[in-house]
Amino acid sequence: MGRAVGWAAGIVGFIALAVIAGLVLFDWNLLRSPLAHWVTQETGRDFAIEGDLQGEFSLTPSLRARDIRLGNAEWADTPNMVEIAELAVHLDLRGLLRGHVVVSEVRVTGAQIHLETDAQGRANWDLEALPALPEERVEVPHLERLIIEDSRLTLRERVRDITFEATLAAAAVVSPEAGAYPVRLDGDGEIEGRAYSIRAGGAPLLMLRETDIPYPFEIEIDIEATSARLTGYLGTPLAFDGLDAEFHVTGPNPARLAPVLQIPLPSTRPYDLAGRLLRDGHHWRYEAFRGTVGDSDLAGTIDVETDRERPLITADLVSEALDIVDLIPVIGVPPPLVEDVPETLPERLLPDAPLQIEQLRAVDADVHFRGTRVIARALPFHDVELLLELEDGVLQLTPWRFGLAGGEFNLYASIYSGAVPVETDVDLRLTGLGLGPLLAGVAPEGAAQGTLNGRILFSSTGDTLRGALATADGEAALVMGRGRVSESVLALLDAGFLEALAVILANGEPQPMEIRCFLAAFDLRQGVMHTEVMILDTEDSIIAGEGTVDLGEETLDLRVSGEPKALEIAGARVPIEIGGRFSAPEVAIDPDGIAVRGVLGLALGALLAPLAAIVPLIELGLAEDGDCQELFEDIEMEVAPE
């Protein structure tokens, strides 16, 4: 019995030694072919380990492979999607006692990863079989150390013309508390022809498993002259969700990012904003941000809902000191022109920057903006409020309101971006504008009195402000009742013009003008405003005008003349011609006064037909006064807002 037990023990010992020797002497390269065959079958891509495959059996086994490659899609530019010079993996099987395998270390050296999409949107990383990413943080492999050396990632996305080339790095031990992150991605590229760079860092990957500790990270992105920095935490890092971070962004003009972000953004002067960026599922929120846009302050909150057919952008914005110059780029005037006013104006003043049509069709929006105080050097603006709605490609201003000269300037507009060309309806209302405040820049307080009301209605086509005005069809009117202009204001005009306008002079000095009624009405056809009537009725004279204003060509062709009411001073008067371009108007005395007198008679006769039928208005000088109420009854369009 003892001899048998001895033989048995010897046999077992021999087998054990044989197994140990086999494990020690095992040629791991024998596994390369079956391993490559299995990966190829699972992914549908050619896979090979072309260098040595080495391993070690123990409670902390390791595996090292050299010259690994995974083939690319047939349509891709490069033959391989992944190339790795050396991959080493170390396990700790003692973790099985706690129910999981511990990956004590992964070291990647000399990796080259090539990602790309083609013009049809196919991605080379769409493999036949690819392990699903963990949905919960506890499902993340227990990876204690990740070391990446001499490795790069390249990306080419042809649909949106994006290229990216980055350095991948992961250090063995770096403490985020010390101001550095062990996991790094630093790269540069281009997106739609715009150069950009990304510098990103994160905490050790082991922290991905810590369900009760947010994952810290930082990202810096530069796109040309625009810079953004995001520093904070992710509650659900695998889905980039549960975001809570400080977000600081600066740049010359957000409109430059519209093609990149695929959302409509206004054109502005340089901006610098900082606030808190949050994400909860499909809801993004940039809250309590503050900063500057141009010379104006700006604060507020922006929300974006992405779980819709079109993302919804909701914004509540306020400026406590709004420089009116900072609003000019919004209508299409290039910011450089706003910031550096040239010595001579360009020939064309109306902006021709196109609407962001594709972006208008891609999102919905609900924006409320308030400017509690407006800084304006030339016009007496008080405050501003914008209500903007964008739904299914239709942008509506409901309205864009300015407090101006004691009254209001309200712009209601509907822009239909789905139409080709773009269609626009505009309703511009002027209510209660004080003549005195409007002339405050050239006249002392109290030198001018009166209240202006007006309305412009038109429809047009075109995807720029210049193009839309060039095709506008509609009507316009401006009226003022009783008012007064003092001699100090009239004295600013040349004596020849005063005489041409039949302004009463005493000893060569103008006398105050007592206004009974002012009325101007235009018919707007294909961008050309034709005067239906232009008349200023004062206690002493009638001043009238006729002509056209071409919004498409930006030219003026107007003639203005006055006639005294007193018969004893009636006679031929030389009219004033107003011509030239918007950028360089020309005002001159018309040497041919006889022709315009007939036109003046027609203009007045359109309003005061009974008198026009009885007497030659010009020579008699209108012995009877006009009256605003009577003039209103002859105008087809109601100028006062509803």
Image (spheres, rainbow, N blue to C red):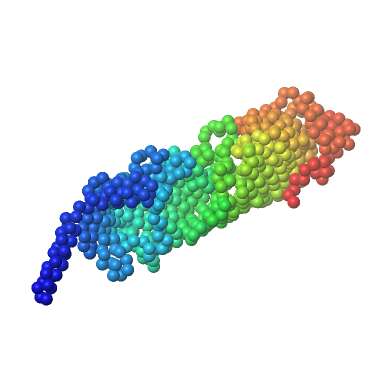
- Of residues 83 and 222, the one drawn nearer to the viewer in this rendering: 83
Q: Is 135 left or right of 574, judged from the image as shown?
A: left
Q: Position of residue 324 (x, y in %)?
A: 56, 46
Residue at image location 14% in from the left, 63% down from the top: 17
Q: Residue furthest bottom?
A: 1
Residue 238 picture location, percent across and down: 41, 58
Tell me if 262 is positioned left or right of 212 in this view.
right
Q: Is residue 267 left or right of residue 444?
A: left
Q: Residue furthest top?
A: 592
For the N terminus, which image quadrant? bottom left
The residue lying at 23 percent from left, 51 percent from top is 30
Q: Please tell me which residue lies in front, 351 or 82.
A: 82
Observer-nearest residue: 518 or 521? 521
Q: Residue furthest right?
A: 614
Q: Could you tell me residue 605's position as x and y percent?
A: 83, 34
Residue at 52 percent of width and 38 percent of height: 337
Towards the viewer: 297 or 13 = 13
Rendered view: 437 above or below 334: below
- From this viewpoint, is residue 626 visible? yes
Q: Relative to 100, is 315 on the left or the right?
A: right
The percent coordinates of residue 224 (x first, y second) are: 42, 42
Q: Is residue 411 above or below residue 601?
A: below
Residue for point 44% across, 51% down = 249
In this rendering, the count of numbered labels is: 0
Q: Quadrant of residue 480?
A: top right
Instruction: Answer whether residue 504 is visible to the viewer in this image.
Output: no
Task: Name the image quarter holding residue 464.
Answer: top right
